[in-house]
Amino acid sequence: MEPIQTERLLVRDFNENDWQSVHDYASDPEVVRYMEWGPNTEEETKNFIQRTIPSQKEQPRQKYTLAIILRDDTELIGSSGIKVSNPNNLEAEVGYCLNRQFWGRGYATEVGKALLRFGFEKLNLHRIFATSDPENKASVHVLENIGMNREGRLREHKWIKGTWCDSYLYAILDREWTTMRMGDSE
């Protein structure tokens, strides 16, 4: 796929050389606190990279696991993704994970908006959703900031690090995104 460019970021497919930069954040307990995976060993991070590469060649492609790169200095600062979860209903899930050094700078919001644009304009989706742990206030803020609506709370939705955790469910429809985009251009 063609890399997605934003004002400060380049969002592209992973390659084998990315594993060390990924491991820098994937092994950080604070970064993966709300994730179902991690903290990763080096082997787990290398396996993650190896699993992402074959999906890049699938036709039609349903899973986009993507590296987040700073455009200015080409540093890999995180991962993001959009996965077509229901092709018949034109529905996909988005997510993101950033190295802690880059939290609080608006990068997650920037990549989130880019994923929505890609999903609606390139993949012609009808609905894009995301989940977030209710305790993950920063992620909840990002999802709301990119125009997603909270649709509900999934009780004990995920088994994370030895305990059942709830998730907020967020989503945005294509017509809502179009309306939001039209409002941004005025």
Image (cartoon, helix red, strand yellow):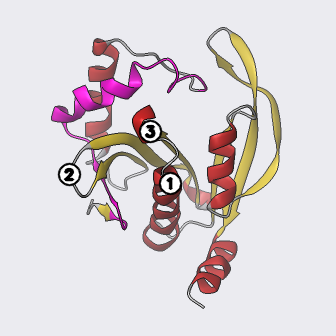
| Residue at image coords 25%, 48% | 57
C-alpha separation, residue under disc 1 versus residue under disc 3:
11 Å
Q: Can residue 48 be seen by looking at this rendering? A: no
Residue under numbered circle 1: 106
| Residue at image coords 26%, 38% | 53
Residue 37: x percent and y percent?
50, 20
- The quarter of the displayed image where residue 88 is located: bottom right
Three-letter amino acid code of the residue under disc 1 = Gly
Three-letter amino acid code of the residue under disc 2 = Asp
Residue 65: x percent and y percent?
38, 43
Instruction: Give the mark nearest the N terminus, 1 or 2.
Output: 2
Query: In the image, which residues are magenta?
Result: 5-34
Residue under numbered circle 3: 98
Residue 80: x percent and y percent?
43, 45
In the picture shown, does residue 107 fall above or below 39?
below
C-alpha separation, residue under disc 2 versus residue under disc 3:
16 Å
Image quarter of the N terminus: bottom left
Circle on res. 73? 2
